[in-house]
């Protein structure tokens, strides 16, 4: 997404890392050093950035006896910021990038419509790639909560089944070996 790249160039990367830590842990309160470690920013710089974010009403400072903790303020401002900084992840693109390098796969086809949570994929190639593809599918499921159901067919099987009307409907070639 080009917009996020422009933002990252315009704004201090350390500020963005600190904001990202808060956005990834909306319910958590952080001590200054803990926040700095999580964002990989020095304590002095974290302190300076925290001051700006508190003043901007993006995070709140909570005093507990002589200690201070910081937490993101959930508001229209921070929701807008989260939306602006969120990088869109396309699990199907990740799937294609990881499977196209597996020897024995000739093409990857989306069968039917992709939903926000799942997709059906036909893989044309050797059936001995099943375990490797399973690993990719499990990784995407864990990281992106996106389910990919796949079927591996030889080229001949795919052509015959298409001819019989078994795989009629929407099909989109996501990748084909050149």
Image (tube, grey):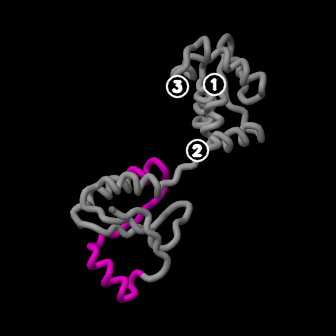
Locate residue 128 relative to residue 170 in the image: left or right: left
Q: Residue at x 67, y 15 (%)?
A: 48
Which segment did they paint magenta? 139-167
Which residue is label 3 attached to?
38
Q: Position of residue 115 (x, y in %)?
A: 54, 65
Q: Secondary structure at mark 1?
A: loop
In the rendered structure, which disc, 3 or 2, sits on the residue that comes first in sequence? 3
Is disc 2 surrounded by few (<14), some (14 to 19) or many (20+) residues within 10 Å? Answer: few
In the rendered structure, which disc, 1 or 2, sits on the residue that comes first in sequence? 1
Which residue is label 2 attached to?
87
Q: CA distance from mark 1 to mark 3?
A: 17 Å
Nearest to viewer (mark 3 / mark 2): 2
Where's the C terminus, which quadrant? bottom left
Using the image as rendered, state which of residue 28 and residue 52 is in the foreground: 52
Which residue is label 1 attached to?
12
Q: Position of residue 39 (x, y in %)?
A: 54, 25
Contact check, label 1 and label 2, Cβ < 8 Å: no
Pick out the residue farthest to the bottom. 164
Q: Residue at x 37, y 64 (%)?
A: 176
């Amino acid at each position: 997404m080009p917009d996020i790249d422009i933002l990252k160039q315009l704004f201090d990367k350390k500020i963005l890392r600190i904001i990202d830590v808060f956005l990834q842990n909306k319910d958590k309160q952080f001590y200054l050093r803990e926040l700095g470690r999580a964002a990989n920013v020095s304590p002095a710089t974290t302190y300076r950035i925290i001051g700006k974010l508190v003043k901007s009403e993006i995070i709140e400072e909570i005093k507990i006896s002589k200690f201070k903790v910081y937490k993101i303020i959930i508001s229209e401002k921070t929701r807008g910021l989260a939306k602006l900084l969120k990088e869109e992840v396309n699990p199907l693109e990740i799937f294609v990038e990881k499977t196209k390098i597996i020897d024995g796969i000739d093409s990857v086809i989306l069968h039917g419509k992709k939903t926000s949570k799942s997709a059906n994929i036909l893989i044309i190639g050797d059936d001995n790639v099943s375990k490797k593809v399973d690993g990719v599918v499990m990784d995407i499921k864990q990281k992106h909560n996106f389910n990919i159901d796949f079927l591996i067919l030889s080229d001949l099987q795919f052509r015959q089944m298409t001819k019989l009307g078994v795989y009629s409907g929407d099909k989109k070639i996501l990748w084909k070996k050149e």
